Amino acid sequence: MERYIPNTLFPYPDTYIEQCKKQLGITVSKEFVECANAQLTPLFEKEVGFKVNNHVELYLSMPRDQEFFLRIGPVTKLSCQLIINTRNFWVTMSWKSTSGRIYYVGESDIDCSDIEFWLEGIDALAYNKQMYPNVGQPFKLKDLTYELIIDRLNMDCNIQLQLKKGVMSDTAKLLQKVDDFIGEFNEKSEKNNRIDGVVHNWKHFVEDDLITYEMDLGSARASFLKKLLQFFSKLNVFSSVRVE
């Protein structure tokens, strides 16, 4: 009976393995797919800011649609297609090991604590627009107290916060609240083995009623940004927030 693992990037791992052999002539082990699935699904969710469901799947790249490649080395790269809400996006699945061992896709003795997977070519903004075409902005954020404008979603981002006119606010205290929110997020994640990732660096600039944050989202990625945007709404002092 074919396995079905819902809400993961490889919901039908046996079909993936079968099609790799049939379409590409590549033998892929179930242990390899299971390890990739366990690591890539939560990583993808952090990067894009929404949960994997039955409209999201990582699949093999077909030579008729794009160049197929499997480049083996200290960092091995495999071309893939990410299917989101019926549209295909080309990405690269990459992996390396802590021990220096080169893992091959057909091997069954996969040490999932030694191998590290990630995806290259992620476009979080495009995926959000494809996933939620009827929503004006990514993340399906509702009832925000400000106008949200997202020009780009990336690990390094600028966030411009426009203060509401007529709202008296102690800027120093406001900045401290934001810094505390980020710091507490990092601290909580650190105590839980960095399960939610951490924000690497951030700094702010103030010019009149405009606050600009330069932020390296690090391993926290878009899932943290979503929480931060909700926090800004609770503060209820901004007329607009732009992410670029």
Image (tube, rainbow, N blue to C red):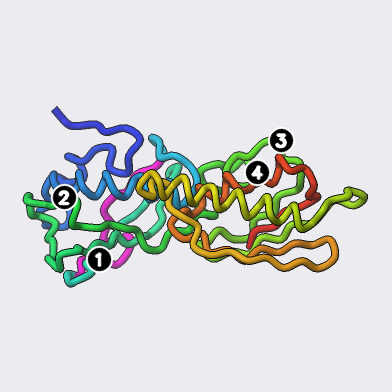
State how far apart marks 1 and 4 are (Cα). Answer: 38 Å
Q: Element under label 2?
A: helix
Q: Which residue is mark 4?
A: 231
Q: What residue does disc 3 label?
A: 143
Quadrant of image for the N terminus: top left
123 in the magenta segment:
no
Query: What's the CA distance linking mark 3 and mark 2?
Result: 43 Å
Tell me the kind of residue under disc 2.
Phe
Marks 4 and 3, how far apart at CA: 12 Å
Determine whether label 3 and label 1 are within 8 Å by CB: no
Q: Which residue is mark 1?
A: 77
In front of the other: label 2 or label 4?
A: 4
Amino acid type at image mark 4: Phe
- Relative to 10, say whether 219 is above or below: below
| Mark 2 lies on residue | 32
Helix or strand or loop: what does disc 4 sit on?
Answer: helix
Asked whether the viewer can see residue 192, the reply is: yes
Element on which disc 1 rests = strand
User: Magenta span covers which residues?
Assistant: 56-71
Rendering coords of residue 105 (x, y %): 14, 56
Q: Which numbered disc covers residue 34?
A: none
Instruction: Find the residue positioned furthest to the right.
Output: 166
Residue visible at 25% across and 58% down?
Answer: 116
C-alpha span from label 2 to label 4: 39 Å
